[in-house]
Amino acid sequence: MRLRAIVAATAIAIAAPSLVAAHGGRSETVVPRFNEAIPNIPGKSLIAVEVDYAPGQASRPHMHAKSAFIFAYVISGEIESKVNGGETRIFKAGQSWSEPPGATHSISRNPSKTRPARLLAVFVVDTDDKALTTPIK
């Protein structure tokens, strides 16, 4: 499958109805948008999730799957992010970043106190990895 087809499939998946999983009402809301094996890369899958943050909401510090390469794109609002002890950055709508496999995400939040924020996270991950994130204690 060519990259253009993968991107198109991900965009179409954003419009699909889906199951919403909330984390205790105090954290982000994660909506699965796409999950398919990559036919020309045996053992790998492409998974896309939409993450919604109400004003001031944040994810708990977490670690991503050891096999997961992640592309994150801010759909609306702003997202404050810190990965692997790097600098804390604020990404605005239309901006993106990537995260290496096994990344530690100590900050992922909506810095606004008045506006919601939304991002699309696209994972290239081992098909057998079921947990995309694991909370850090």
Image (tube, grey):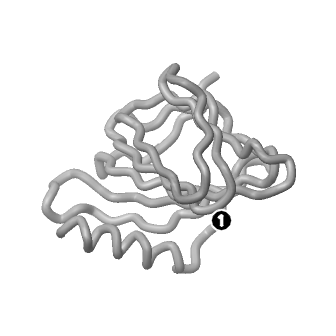
Residue visible at 64% across and 46% down in the picture: 79
Q: In this view, does 33 lie to the left or right of 5?
A: right
- Residue at coordinates 80% horizontally, 57% vertically from top-left? 115
Which quadrant of the figure contains the N terminus? Answer: bottom left
Nearer to me, 108 or 19: 108
Q: Where 68 sits versus 1, above or below?
A: above
Q: Residue at 72% across / 46% down in the picture? A: 110
**Closest to the observer, 124 or 117:** 117
Total numbered circles: 1
Q: 91 left or right of 24?
A: left
Q: Quadrant of the C terminus?
A: top right
Report the residue that reaches farthest toward the right: 114
What x and y, as percent, mark residue 113?
Answer: 85, 47
Residue at label 1? 20
Nearest the viewer among 55 and 22 is 55
Which image quadrant is residue 93 in? bottom right
Graded by Cα atoms within 10 Å as few (under 14), some (14 to 19) or many (20 or more), the crowding at tag 1 reads few
x and y percent of residue 24 in the render?
78, 47
Residue 135 falls in image quadrant: top right
At mark 1, the secondary structure is loop
Closest to the observer, 73 or 40:
73
The residue drawn where x is 32% and y is 38% is 67
Q: Residue 85: image x %, image y %?
A: 52, 20
Q: Where is residue 37 in the image (x, y as percent from the top left)?
A: 27, 62
The amino acid beneath tag 1 is Val
Q: In this view, does 103 lie above or below 58?
A: above
Residue 113 versus residue 82 in the image, above or below: below
